[in-house]
Image (cartoon, helix red, strand yellow):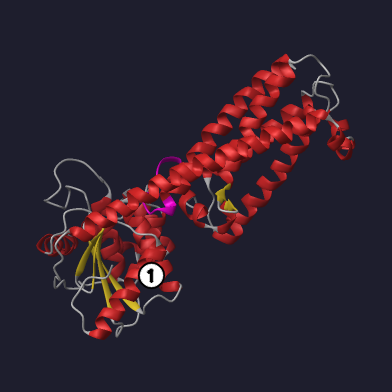
Amino acid sequence: MRKSFYVLTALAGAGLYAGEELVKIHIATKFGTGGDTGLCAAAEGFSCSDVARHALSSIAGLPIAALGEAFYLTLLLSVFLIRFLPKGKLPGIADSLLVASTLGVLYSVFLGVASKVLIGKLCPWCMVLYAINLGVALTLFFGHPEGDGKGAFKRALALPGRAGFWAVAGLMALSTLGAQAAYAHRAEKAHQTYLLRKAAQARKPAAQVQVAPGNVESRGPADAPVTIIEFSDFECPYCQILAKGLKQAQQEGAGPFKYHFRHWPMDDACNPHIKGKFHEDACNAAYAAECARQQGRFWEMHDTLFDNRRRLKRPDLQGYAQTLGLDPERFGACLDDPATKTAIQADIAAGRAAGVGGTPMWFINGWLIEGARPPADLIALIEQAAENAKAGKAQPPK
């Protein structure tokens, strides 16, 4: 059991780390303060935040990642009991862990398939946990202290009558209560920070600004009572959140409203208001979107660029253009055309004149709002703006 003890200890530690990363992502996604970065944006088809938004990511309001942390803590404590208590002191404890970890592997398979089929994205940190779950099950099977991993499944129905089962169940119950309390505290803290941010913005003097919609055709009905004009950057994680939130709000029937996209890349290659290197591929991404617009595929390119926010090099952009069926020669020539940069800088100048200094910043019927918002908040703002427009009230939605 000594080798298995070290392997299981390492796996439990890795599981706690990966679970903590997922809990942080869940909280950031819930309160509109995070997007896909690092591992979560490492490949096309990856998105931790999209998966975190889905109902399958939680059980009774608690992220399954937090339940995973409870399991790995239980595993860690249990293997210490197996290693250091006299042999036979807690009969059935290894069997209980093996059965539980096997169920965890089956649940991992279900979640992985559901993620791909229902959401269309894979969560890489989740896949790390799936691999850890498999490693735990295999280690317990082949390193069973009684040398009988296969027999554990034959003894499964008798486990409730053994002390080890109740030791594992008790540790899991206590760990779950602890994980629930920790998550509730952190979620409440994030919620309060979010409310303070909203209150600070509400205290700013409101002014309605006339902002032209730019060259991009709107998404939404032309006669909608609510118009949103967003200044955005394809490399910005918060812009990605806002873009997905607006699309979701429209799909859920908020409004009706229409929204326009205008460019504000945080990249000194085309934005004179950015000093130094920041989003080094944002200007190229903006050029690609403008070139797609010229071929009638702006919104398709818009969605593709945000879905691949960390892969915006020129070969990537050319690949996206090919996937979208754009004329490759025309697209390539457009990327190099000085007029394309001029078009982007016209958006930048318009944004600067309207008070834009970062991203995302957006205007709802002329009222400035900063930062990303969860879809529920977007829907509330849109509905309030529609009511104000109908009543002829010149006041910002709140």
Report if residue 230 lies within the magenta region. no
Q: Quadrant of residue 10?
A: top right
Residue 273 drawn at (x, y percent): 12, 50
Q: Position of residue 41 (x, y in %)?
A: 43, 46
The residue at 29%/51% (across/down) is 196
Q: Residue at x 36, y 80 (%)?
A: 256
> At 55% across and 59% down in the image, what residue appears?
119
Inspect this view and state whether residue 326 appears: no
Rendering quarter of residue 19 = top right
Residue type, numbered disc 1: Ile
Mark 1 lies on residue: 379
Task: Report x, y in % for residue 309.
Answer: 37, 51
Residue 62 falls left or right of residue 366: right
Q: Nearer the viewer, residue 238 or 344?
A: 238
- Magenta stretch bounds: 29-39
310 versus 332 height, above or below: above
**229 versus 16 height, above or below:** below
- For the N terminus, the quadrant is top right
Magenta span: chief secondary structure? loop
Residue 378 shows in the view: yes
Instruction: Depth check: give the residue in front, 178 or 81.
Output: 178
Quadrant of the drawing holding the C terminus: bottom left
